Amino acid sequence: MRIEDPKLLTAFRELDVECKPAVSLAELTYLGIGGTTDLLSIRRHDAIPDLLNLLDAQGIPHKFLGGGSNLLVIDGDLPFVVLQLASREPDVVIEGNIASVDAAADLGRTVTFCAKRNLGGLEGLIGVPGTVGGALRMNAGAYGTQIGYYVREVKLYRAATRRLETLDGQQISFEYRHTSFAPDDMMLSVKLELPAKPYPEILQGIRICNEKRRASQPLGQKSAGCIFKNPPGASAGRMIDELGLRGFAVGDARVSDRHANFFINAGHASAADMLALIAAVRERVRGTYGVTLENEVVVWNA
Ligand code: EPU
């Protein structure tokens, strides 16, 4: 989708919003798949309500992009524009046990920044790619921890009220890869309350998680992490593996040889290839185990 109306482009500039034309989502997602559209880069949080009012008044559909690490985007000229927070400096500020983190901050960098200031708890999240905003929205978790454990306050654009709001941690429910945020809410910043721990101890935890991840996941290949959520009491990866589906492919979309719940773009996979692979694997698991696997990956297909 292209925005060409000069009045609208001027209005964006007045809101400090940069319109980057015809951006390829394949270049902004870890899967390396996705078509093109205009990307609106937001420099001021307080501009968001006016920006969304403008887009809605013009009937321009939009989606919010975080770090693109858990995302599968359809191909071609996309029927929506993409909104993304520009990164700001400093993106993490520490006061006592509280880390105030911008939603655009890189999650891994945030974990190490806090660690070096003797704040722990987030060790398990090292190696989870993406932004803090994306991690919040999905309640990212790994190795026994999840970001939701530490959330004390979230600033967001709330679609229901069309305003910027601040929610107390207790007002938000964080479940397994799910939160009570609405799909159109946009995370802006978070206050995390983290336990004090000596840096060497945190570093030890970080090293252990890094090793576990290296031993079991296809790092360095184009993927969106785990494709399916684990069903209660079971492992999607193990079920897919038991069906002998490692290496199973549709075009260049392939089940990883290393971890069967990671699907890889092994070359020039299209979104259609990846969606067909997801559907085929879901069907095989349903046929054998009677379980319908739910996507963990977020799909932008309209
Ligand atoms: N397994 C197999 N074959 C495979 C993959 C896994 O037999 O191909 C077995 C493992 O041997 C293990 C069990 O299945 O006994 C669970 O595997 P693993 O420890 O790798 O964890 P997982 O449940 O597959 C979850 C998260 C990961 C997270 C790891 C570590 C989900 C969907 N996945 O994976 O998160 O990194 O635990 O905590 O919850 C993600 O969210 O994208 C993600 C990768």
Image: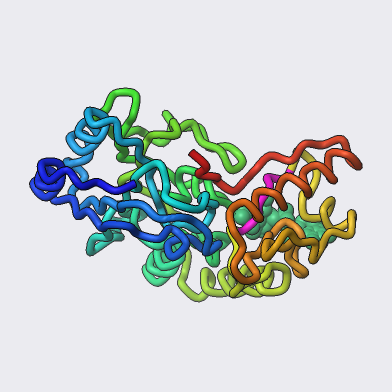
Q: Residue at x 52, y 64 (%)?
A: 32
Assign the magenta stretch its main secondary structure.
loop
Which one is in front, 25 or 232? 25
Residue 8 against residue 111 in the figure, above or below: above
Q: For residue 229, say whether it is visible.
A: yes
The picture places residue 58, in percent across and down from the top left corner, at 23, 31
Q: Is residue 226 magenta?
A: yes
Residue 285 against residue 34 in the figure, above or below: above
The picture places residue 143, in percent across and down from the top left corner, at 64, 58
Q: Is residue 152 left or right of residue 226?
A: left
Q: For residue 119, say whether it is visible.
A: no
Q: Is residue 67 left or right of residue 263?
A: left
**Quarter-wise, where is residue 181 in the image?**
top left
Q: Quadrant of ligand 1?
A: bottom right
Which one is in front, 62 or 121? 62
Q: Residue at x 40, y 72 (%)?
A: 116
The part of the chain drawn in magenta is 225-230
Q: Is residue 47 magenta?
A: no
